[in-house]
Amino acid sequence: MPESLEQLLAQVRACQLCVHALPLGPRPVLQAGAAARLRIVGQAPGRKVHESGIPWDDASGERLRAWLAIDRSVFYDPQKVAILPIGFCYPGRGQSGDQPPRPECAPRWHARLNALLPRVSLTLLVGRHAQAYYLGPTCRATLLETVRAWRSYLPSGYLPLPHPSPRNQPWVARNPWFEAEVLPSLRRAVAAALAPERLQVSAAQETGPVPGQARSRRRRSRP
């Protein structure tokens, strides 16, 4: 009998594969629902996210949501947005920032999770680790080159982005084309991926209230 997404998520959240290498112990942080249409693949949770257990629950997340032009209610709806970092657990600190994601995580879980997300139409690859894993040999030599080539990946459903960490603000400042060219297209692509939900609302508005509702409103409006 094939496994369900709920069963697989329970397995991921109970994973002990890297317990020996995690300074704060395992606490996988991810989000997914079978109806999700947008997938966000980042690097690994930071310390604050490890403590809260909520993906992108930090300054980087605030900036990412601003880039996407979506609010927290949409971002944290697993039936709209799947969030699958390359490493599900906080890897600890290194000499200059957090350690890279554990290498065991993505090969163990991502293909199985993605197989249960059939409605995803757009995948955002946030940071070098996500881009290298998902783009494979088509990934360019540097993050700068990969992000600049974003148009070449979009037909395959991928859109590479720099990490939205405040530490990367100098990168954004040095590359004004990112905010001028990529962000408007990113927002359109995200809106298109999430469009079915908005289209349903628009269709309901266009058809107007059902007859019973209309009569009820007319009765309430009588003096």
Image (tube, rainbow, N blue to C red):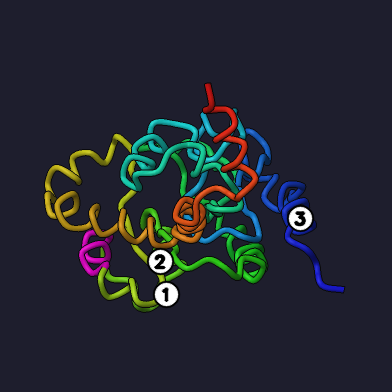
Q: Which mark is residue 108?
A: none
Disc 2 to disc 3: CB gap under 8 Å: no
Mark nearer the viewer, 1 or 3: 3
Where disc 1 sits, the SS reads helix
Question: Residue at (13%, 51%) from the top-left corner?
Answer: 175
Where disc 3 sits, the SS reads helix
Where disc 2 sits, the SS reads helix
**Measured from the top left, where is residue 197 in percent x and y?**
51, 55
Quarter holding the N terminus is bottom right
Which amino acid type is shown beneath numbered disc 2?
A: Ala
**Measured from the top left, where is residue 160 in percent x and y?**
34, 61
Residue occupied by mark 1:
136
Disc 1 to disc 3: CB gap under 8 Å: no
**Residue positioned most to the front:** 223
107 displayed left or right of 193:
right
Foreground of the two, 53 or 90: 53
The answer to if 144 sits in the magenta stretch is yes
Mark nearer the viewer, 2 or 3: 3
Residue occupied by mark 2:
132
The answer to if 172 sits in the magenta stretch is no
**Residue positioned most to the top:** 223
Q: What distance separates the C-alpha of mark 1 from that of mark 2?
A: 5 Å
In the rendered structure, which disc, 2 or 3, sits on the residue that comes first in sequence?
3
Disc 1 to disc 2: CB gap under 8 Å: yes
Residue occupied by mark 3:
6
**Measured from the top left, where is residue 142 in percent x and y?**
26, 63
Query: Which contiguous range is marked in magenta?
Result: 143-150
